[in-house]
Amino acid sequence: MTPPTNLTLSWMRRHEIQACVRQIIVAGGLAFASTFAQPGVVTLNFSGTYDIGGGPVFGLTGAAVPFNYSITYDTSLNTSSVHLSPGDPAGGGSVAGDDFYGYSASGIVGTSLTFGTGTWTVTDLSPRLVGTSVAADLFFNTDIALAVPTHVNALFNILDGGLLLGGLVDLGGGVVAYDSVSVITGEGLGHAIGAVTISSTSTAVPEPGSLILVATAFIALLGCRRSSRTAYSSEEGVRARGFPRLGVAATPHRRIAT
């Protein structure tokens, strides 16, 4: 039997390592891309100051009373498919003057909506209409998984008063757009109104497919280690048969005269 040469064994090991590295790069790259392409959890913050008139609002008075609310939304739980682009009909002769992305209450996983002694929760959310026929639990002017919105239309109602974030205005000619204020009103209350500013932070959420790809990359790594051990064992077997080890030049056997 012709022994394998050093060059042949080196090529075999190099080929196995390169194949393993390719598997890991491909599986890991797919897992990375899939993870960050998926929708995530977004925390939206609404802040500004209220000008309060006509009496206290939930125990607070003043011309520049700060407010700070937040809604945490899991976009993977959104069941609304509503989206209007500017110029799209909204029913009743109305047309959209902004982008309207509809969202369902099912995606709200946390709220912090307190002003003075008043607090609202997701169960107090009242569905909103754009025009006469386009409805969702709340609206933003962007896909919140991809971009920070600058406008919102959401209403929370409790017995003591309502909290409106954003809302709608008629621009004339049936064109409906977002308002940029927050308002608190209610029976027995004064009124609070102020411009609202929106900011957000988001967290990517790996989906099961991403986790499978990560596992595939790990399995490929284990396979590479096993292949490396096998190749080393094969080399040791070659040595056991009297063949030279990789990188060691063959030394011819001399017959000893007797």
Image (cartoon, helix red, strand yellow):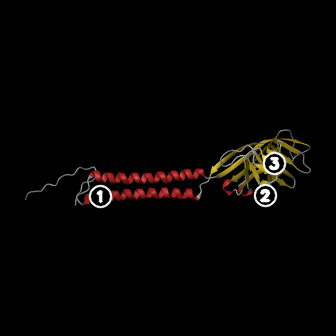
Distance from label 2 to label 1 (Cα)?
A: 71 Å
Q: CA distance from mark 3 to mark 1?
A: 81 Å
- Residue 158 is tagged as none
In this view, the mark in front (3 or 1):
3
Q: Amino acid at mark 1?
A: Glu
Label 3 amino acid? Ser
Label 2 CA crowd tier, 10 Å (few <14, some 14–19, many 20+): few
Of all residues shown, which one is farthest toward the left?
258
The N terminus sits in image quarter: bottom left
Pick whichever of labels 2 and 1 is earlier in the sequence: 2
SS label for mark 3: strand
Element on which disc 2 rests: helix
**Residue at left 30%, top 57%?**
235
Residue named by callout 3: 94
Q: Quadrant of the C terminus?
A: bottom left
Q: For the image shown, how many numbered marks are present on the structure?
A: 3
* Residue carrying label 2: 123
| Figure check: 235 above or below 50 | below
Residue 213 position within the rendered picture, expressed as x and y whole percent measured from the top left: 52, 56
Residue drawn at (41%, 56%) of the image: 224
Q: Which residue is mark 1?
A: 236
